[in-house]
Amino acid sequence: MKYKTLLLMLAGLGVLAIMVLFIGPEKIGSAFKQANPWYVVLAVVVQLAIYGLWTERWAITISSLDISIKRRQLLPMLLVGLAINNITPSGRGGGEPVRAYILAKYSQAPTENAFATVIADRGLDTFPFIALAILTIILAVIYINLPQWMIITLIICLIVLIIIFVLALYMSLNREFGDRTIRWFLRIINRISNKIHDRIELQAINAVEGFQDSMKVMVTDRKVLLYGIPLSFLIWGLEILRVYIIFIAFNIYAPLEIIAVVFVISTLIGMIPLLPGGLGAVDGMMILLYSYAGISPSVSAAATIVERLISFWMTTILGVAVLPYFGADAVEKMFKKL
């Protein structure tokens, strides 16, 4: 692991530690003692169901390109990608190339096809999130007395996310724009390294065109949209339900819309590629916003810690644990991302 990644993870943990010290470890500890462990177990079960639905959604994009792979192999690949997302400051995108690489290796599919399934999967995830984020910002103004600067920051983050999503979608489907973009990118690399030549440029353009062909197949496949988008809304709904269940474990029956608003806003902040997996930023934002909404800081902190143990740390540990199953080259690719 590179020192930069390690330092960023420590910085994220430091932010959380400062908030815990500010609120009071003894108060948070007292809140933990009141928690109902059975609801925590239920939240873990919900998270396991989310893993299954993530796998099913990815399988939809894979089947549209006739890539042959067993479903039981997809879940470990997915977990590896999620783990790398969590330990790299990449806006939840660092693990996707590794996930595509493993899929291509085990299915014998072209790399550009495997990568297209991953990008399509992220697109299916992002579209509902944008819709939820727009609704969330409106609800935040109504239900949570947020400072004006925070609302403006959220709107800017949402606009940037929409622009990136639209540009990525357009590049994935428009051959001319994709070719121009890859040539522009290669020119920048060439100025830095002077190692790019015509053969490599041609290979890159051919790969992009193969990727675009795959994306067009998936976009025109009605099953991808008809099943993938509702499945994505269901997944986001279960993620919000998981947080709601955790608060019930602490005997807090907060309005579901408040839970949803805080979760979506924190996720949006976590997409900013500053700290690995939003570590510290997401945790701090959740504690702050739940406190703004009227939940005691000690319970907000305790519930957030449990939520992140399930959604962040459990996912990361499982992903790293299954990584050796895919061989030394997959491990090497992971460490290159760190």
Image (cartoon, rainbow, N blue to C red):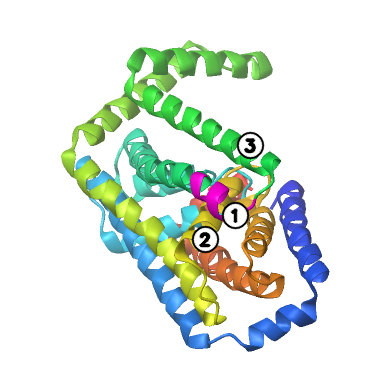
- Disc 1, SS: loop
Where is residue 215 drawn, in percent x and y?
29, 31
- Which tag, 1 or 3, sits closer to the chain's start? 1
Q: Residue at x 26, y 53 (%)?
A: 69
Other-residue count near label 2 (Cα within 10 Å), few / some / many at <14 / 14–19 / ≥20: some
Q: Residue at x 67, y 18 (%)?
A: 192
Of all residues, the one furthest to the left in this rendering is 222
Whether residue 179 appears in magenta in the rendering, the answer is no
Main SS category, magenta section:
helix
In the rendered image, residue 142 lying in the magenta stretch gets the answer yes
Q: Earlier in the sequence, mark 3 or mark 2?
A: 3
Q: How many marks?
A: 3
Nearest the viewer among 232 and 158 is 158
Three-letter amino acid code of the residue under disc 1: Ile
Helix, strand or loop status at disc 3: helix
Label pair 1/3, CB-CB below 8 angstroms: no
Where does label 1 land, which residue? Answer: 144
Residue beneath the point at 18% across and 37% down: 221
Q: What whole-number distance in Å separates the C-alpha atoms at marks 1 and 3?
A: 14 Å
Residues tagged 2 and 1 counted as in contact (Cβ below 8 A)? yes
Three-letter residue code for mark 2: Ile
Measuring from the top left, give residue 180's x and y in whole percent: 45, 12
- Residue 92 location (% of width, % of height): 53, 47
Q: Circle 1: is it few (<14), some (14-19), or many (20+) Cα within 10 Å?
A: some
Mark 2 to mark 1 CA distance (whole Å):
8 Å
The answer to whether residue 85 of the structure is visible from this angle is no
Answer with mark 2 or mark 1, whichever residue precedes in sequence.
Answer: 1
Question: Circle 2 sits on which residue?
Answer: 258
Mark 3 lies on residue: 152
Estimate the spatial distance between the alpha carbons at disc 3 and disc 2, rounded to whole Å: 19 Å
Q: Is residue 269 visible?
A: yes
- Magenta stretch, residue numbers: 138-145
